[in-house]
Amino acid sequence: MKTVNDFNFKGKKAIIRVDFNVPLNDDKEVTDATRIEAAKPTIYKILEDGGSCILMSHLGRPKNKEEEFSLRNIISKASEILGINIKFSEDCIGVAAETAAASLEEGEILLLENLRYHPEETAGDRDFAEALSKLGDIYVNDAFGTAHRAHASTAIIAEFFPDNKCLGLLLASEIENVNKVLSDSKKPVTAVIGGAKVSSKITVLENILDKIDHLIIGGGMAFTFIKAQGGNIGASLVEDDKQDLALEILEKAKEKNVSVHLPVDAIIADSFSELASTETANAGEIPEGWMGLDAGEETNKIFEAVILESKTILWNGPVGVFEMEPFAKGTIHLGNAIAEATKNGAFSLVGGGDSVAAVKQFNLSKKVSYVSTGGGAMLEMLEGKTLPGIKAMQD
Ligand code: AMP
């Protein structure tokens, strides 16, 4: 697959699918610009070559072209971050977009209005993709967050650029970093899978068993495993219909010589609340009415020891309800252990959903090797799927 580094953009208009689906507050101001920052290297490379950039993205899930989902809301923040006054087109296709694109000069950036103002975007409509393709000379996909969707701008459009399509630097580095875990990993390899539900992580668990030496299972999902093994888990989170599957995963792990580490103790609470009474209990001996909301101290020590002897670490999902202060210690302990292992030379990848939020909240972003920008996309890659947005670049 080619990247932007394989092209010279001098005099060319790049049409770039970015992921500017950023959070806005009630005043419609950008509250977290990480995704805009992440698109910078690709945009700069193109501008430095002497090209121009046409940026297309979605924002939220508009039904009826609501103002709150207009990409106009992010112009000032994006202009500030990129250091250039960005131009804007009121529609992403049609005369307005074509005129704006045609008059774009070297070194300029044009942002198109929300792609999802047109339902054809998510439907993967070919005519809509073709209309978008008319705006640029080279198609660049740099939107990892939507690479698992076969939408018009993320996959279908690529067929109109058989020789002139490439990955942006963000998407290329996301792929490279996942492959450091899945293909070219240094052993021992440890996956920490936490979070709320077994059901959302089963395919990941099944796919990674072939690639890892240790599997740490934490968070709410651990209780389904503990109950399946005969433990008493009180009122802890559980998916009763997934108990057989949990046992199957443990069996498969054994066959593949993967050591599984489940919590041995837990911080338990008498309600799902920051103000609940708390105690420590053995993970399989939780009294009726009490629920495990964080890893206990013994568990933290065991998880830490495994992490410190690992050379490759994947972290997906918190090991407790880290959003509530009394139940954040396990996730902090784990995050610090991963940071220490990284300092000692291990490669660590944090990806998918809430572990990324935890890493940010506890200031660990710079202490791990790579933090992925795509939640669902990262999970699907870990599940072993080829993402449509990436596949379109290979064909
Ligand atoms: P996920 O999106 O599947 O990674 O799940 C993340 C969520 O799992 C976070 O919001 C955590 O609060 C939650 N979580 C972690 N541990 C537990 C637990 N023991 N009981 C209930 N929820 C938990």
Image (cartoon, helix red, strand yellow):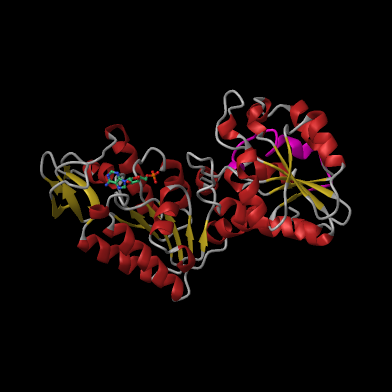
Q: Quadrant of the C terminus?
A: top right
- Return the x and y of residue 372 as percentages of the image width and height: 53, 54
- On screen, residue 179 versus residue 212, left or right, reads right
- Which residue is outermost to the right? 11
Q: Residue furthest bottom?
A: 344
> Residue 242, located in which quarter of the rendered image?
top left
Q: Is residue 343 above or below residue 287?
A: below
62 is higher (above) or lower (below) than 192? above
| Quadrant of res 287 | top left
**Residue 257 visible here:** no
Picture residue at 56% right of the left edge, 33% below the top: 68
Asked whether residue 150 is drawn in magenta, I would say: yes
Percent x, y of residue 42 = 71, 56
Question: How far across and down, in percent of the image, does residue 44 sit?
Answer: 73, 59
* Quarter of the view holding residue 43: bottom right
Q: In the current view of this chain or complex, which residue is farthest to the front?
A: 27
Residue at 51 percent across and 43 percent down: it is: 23
Write the start and end of the magenta stretch as one range. 146-165
Question: Residue 36, can we see it?
Answer: yes
Q: Is residue 291 left or right of residue 122?
A: left
Which residue is located at x 57 percent, y 59 percent? 177
- Please tell me in which quarter of the rendered image ligand 1 is found: top left
Asked whether 332 or 39 is in front, the reply is 39
On whether residue 199 falls in the magenta region, the answer is no
Q: Magenta: predominant secondary structure element?
A: loop
Q: In the displayed structure, does residue 237 sit left or right of residue 347?
A: left
